[in-house]
Amino acid sequence: MKIVCLVKFISDVANFLYDYEKNVLVRENVKLILNPDDACALAFALEVKARRPDTFVEIVTMAPASVLPLVEDLLRRNADRAVIISDRLFSGSDTYVTSKIIARYLENTEYDIILTGTHSLDGDTSHVPSQVAELLKMEQMSNIVRVYDESLQGKTVIVEADTDKTISKYEIALPCILSIGKDSKYKLPFVRYKDLELDVNDRVSVIKNENLSFSEAEVGLQGSLTKVKRTFARKLQSKEKTVVCNDEEGIETVYNFLKSKGFV
Amino acid sequence: MDNQTLLDGLKCILSQEQIDTNYDNLYDAAADRYKKYAKARKVLDVPVPTAIVYPRSVDEVRTLLVYCNENSINVIPRSGKTATEGGLENWKEQTLVIDGKYLNKILNVDLYNMEATVQAGVPLQTLEDEVRKLGCTTGHSPQSKPIAQYGGLVATRSIGQFSTLYGGIEDMVVGLECVFPDGHIARIKNVSRRAGGPDIRHIAIGNEGTLCYITEVTVKLFKFYPENSKFYGYLIQDIDTGIKLLREVMVNGYRPSIARTYSEEDARQHFYHFYKGKSILIFMAEGNREIVNATCAGIEAAVDKFKDGIIEQVDSKLISDWFDHLNWSQQDIDDEVQGMIDNDKHDGFTTEISANWEAIPKIYHNVINRIKSEFPRADDLTMLGGHSSHSYINGTNMYFVYNYNINCAPEDEMRIYHHPLQTIIVEETLKLGGSMCHHHGIGKYRNEWTKEEHGTAYYMLEKLKEAFDPNGIMNFGTIYPQKEGVKYQK
C-alpha cells in the first residue's frame, strides 16, 4: 500500500510572544513547525507502516526549499520519501492555485490513499484538501478522528468523523482523501537517537515548475483570483473562571488543577 | 551456570521468602532513578537481574558473596534504593541484587560515647527518630532521609543538608563491618581517632558496592538544640555574590548548619513566593546557644561586609518553612513516576560537582554559557541554573539543576538530554581542577571520566579492585569503566 501525506509547515503561532507595550505579536525568530493536524495524518500513516512494513509513506509538501531540514526530520521518523514542490513562480498562490499545483503532481503519482490534516493553524480555510480531491475526482472527508486501518485492505475505508454533535461512521471508496483532525490523537513518533544524524538526502525530491509545466499566468500571484475581503483572527474560546478561597477546599481545587496539567 | 541452577543454589542458602523472582520487582531493580523516565514508561534497555535476595545476617551475606564469587555471578549491593547515577542499574544478564532491608536492627545507642550502631538496612529516618527522643541527632539529612538506609548512604559517600556543621557521612562513620567477595568479614573498630596506618574506613565508604558489602555502621551522635536554630534569608544580586558570602562565613571559621546560595533560575523553583526574580542566599545557625549566637554574628558580619550585593533580607520564617518541606517521601517518588506516565515529563535532573572558591564561579558560568550555546536541545530547556549547598574552608559544591521538555522517545532521553548536559558540566569541572561528583557517587554514567577524575591516583583505585574483587563480580560497570557497558551509555 502507498500512502501520500499532504503536509504543510507553518509558523509556530502557538508560541508567538506578545509585545504588550506595542500590542503586537512578535514574529521574529519564530520557528516553522509541521501543522498539528497534518502531524496527526502522518502519524497515522506511520502507524500503518509500523504494523505493515510493506506500506510506503510519501510526504508531499508545497513549500520553500528552506523547509528541507524539517522534511528530513520527518523522513527520520520512518517515512519513505518526501517531495517538496517548490518554485519561485508558485510564490503567492492562493488555495485554489495551490490545489491545482499539488493535484498536477499527484495526477502522475501512484497512491492508494491520500491523508491530510483538516485545518491548518495559520490559514484555517481547509480549502486545499477538498479542492485537490475535486481536481483528482475522488471523495474527501474532513474532521476524521479515527481510521479503521484494517479496512484499508479492501476497496473502501471506514472512518469516524466528528460532525460537531456526534461522531459518525462513514465508508468511503478508495482512493480518497482523508483529512484527519487533531482530536484523533494520532501522535507522531520521535526521531530515535540512532537516527538523529541519519542521511536521508537521497529520499527527498524537489519538484519545480519545469516538471509541472504551468504557465506564469496560471500560478503565483498572477494566477490567483482570490480577493481577500477581510481577515480576522479566530477568537479563542473563553475559559471558565473559578475563584476559590484560601482554605482547604480552595487549596485542594488548585492542587487538583495543577496536577491535571502535570505541574505537580 | 544457568539461571535455574543459580536459583536452586540460592534455595540452599536462603529461605524461599528471602528470594524474589517476581518480574515486576526484577524490572524495578534493573535500574535506579538515573533512568527514571524510561523505567516509568516500561522501555528500559538493560537486562533485569536474575533475583533479588534479602539476607538476614552477615553470615548470609558472606555465603551469598562466596557463592557468587565462585560462580562469577554479578552482584549489586542495594539498601534504600535511592541511587540517582546508575549505581544500581544492571548491565549483566546474570545478576543477583542483595538488598539489605532485613538487616534492619538498631544495635546500640551509646549516649555517653555519642555513637549509634545500626545494620545496613536501617533507614536513616528510623535512627534519627530514635535518637531525637534522646535529645540527639545523627546530623545527617539528605533529601532522601525518609527512605535512604545506612548501607546505601555509606556506600555512596552521601551528604546531608546540614553538612556544613556536621560533615558528610565520611565525617560521621566511626567504624563499620563489611564483607568482601571472598567471604572475609572485616570489622573496623569504633575509635575516636587513630594513626594506625591509612584510614581503611575509606575503602568501604564510597565504594558503591564495587569492593564489598557493608553490613553494619557506627556513626557519631550530636546533641540537638532545635529551639536555638536561627534562619537567615536574603535576596542578592547574583550567585557570584552568594558564593563570596559563603566563603566569607566559612573562612572566618563559622559553621552554620546550612549555607546555600541559588541562581535566579533555581531560586524560582524553590522560592517562587518571595524570590522576586533574584538570587537567594540562606543560612541556618544551629547548636547550643553560645555557638548559635557566635555563628549569627559571623553571618551578620559577612552580610554587612558585602552589603552592596544584598538586595533585601527576607522573613526567616519563609526559610524555616521551606526547610521543613524539603525532603522526599516515598509518596513524592510515586507521584513523580505517575506524572511521568501521564504527562511525558519529569522533575528534571541534577549534576553535583565541587571545586575551590576561585574555580567554582568560573565553572558555573562556563557551564551555563556552553549549555546555552552548544547544547542542541537548548530550546527544550525549561530551567537551567544551580545552587551551592555544601561549603568547606577551601571551596564549595555546585548543584547544576536542569528541567526540559522531553521531545524524544523515553528510551533516548538520557542520551539526548541528560548525558550531553552532564558531559558539559563534567568537562568544565575537570578542566578547572574540580571534582565531577560531589555527593551522588560516580554510578555507571560518569565512569567514562573516572580515570580523569583521579589522574595518577587512579592506580590506587584500580589496585583496590584487583585486590578485593579479583573476579570482578561486584557491581559491574559502577565507578570502573567497562567496554561491555558502553552500549548502554553511547
Image: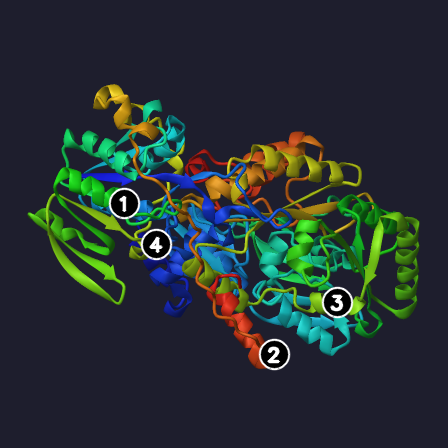
Q: Could you tell whether B194 is left or right of A92 in the image?
A: right
Name the amino acid, label 2.
Answer: Cys
Tell me which residue sits at (34%, 54%) in the image: B6
What percent of the width, then of the height, locates residue A28? 54, 37
- Quadrant of res B168: bottom right
Name the amino acid, label 1.
Answer: His
Q: Is disc 1 in the same subunit as disc 3?
A: no
Q: Is disc 1 in the same subunit as disc 2?
A: yes
Q: Foreground mark, 2 or 3?
A: 2
* Image mark for residue A127: 1
Tell me which residue sits at (27%, 45%) in the image: A127
Residue underneath mark 4: B6
What chain letter is assigned to the residue under label 4?
Answer: B
What chain letter is assigned to the residue under label 3?
Answer: B
Name the amino acid, label 4.
Answer: Leu
10 Å neighbourhood of mark 1: few (<14), some, or many (≥20)?
some
10 Å neighbourhood of mark 4: few (<14), some, or many (≥20)?
some
Instruction: Looking at the picture, tell me which residue is in the foreground, A216 or A188.
Output: A216
Quadrant location, the N terminus of chain A:
top left
Pick out the residue farthest to the top. Answer: A210
Name the amino acid, label 3.
Answer: Leu
* Image mark for residue A245: 2
Inter-mark Cα distance, 2 to 3: 22 Å
Inter-mark Cα distance, 4 to 2: 61 Å
Q: Is disc 2 in the same subunit as disc 3?
A: no
Mark 3 element type: helix
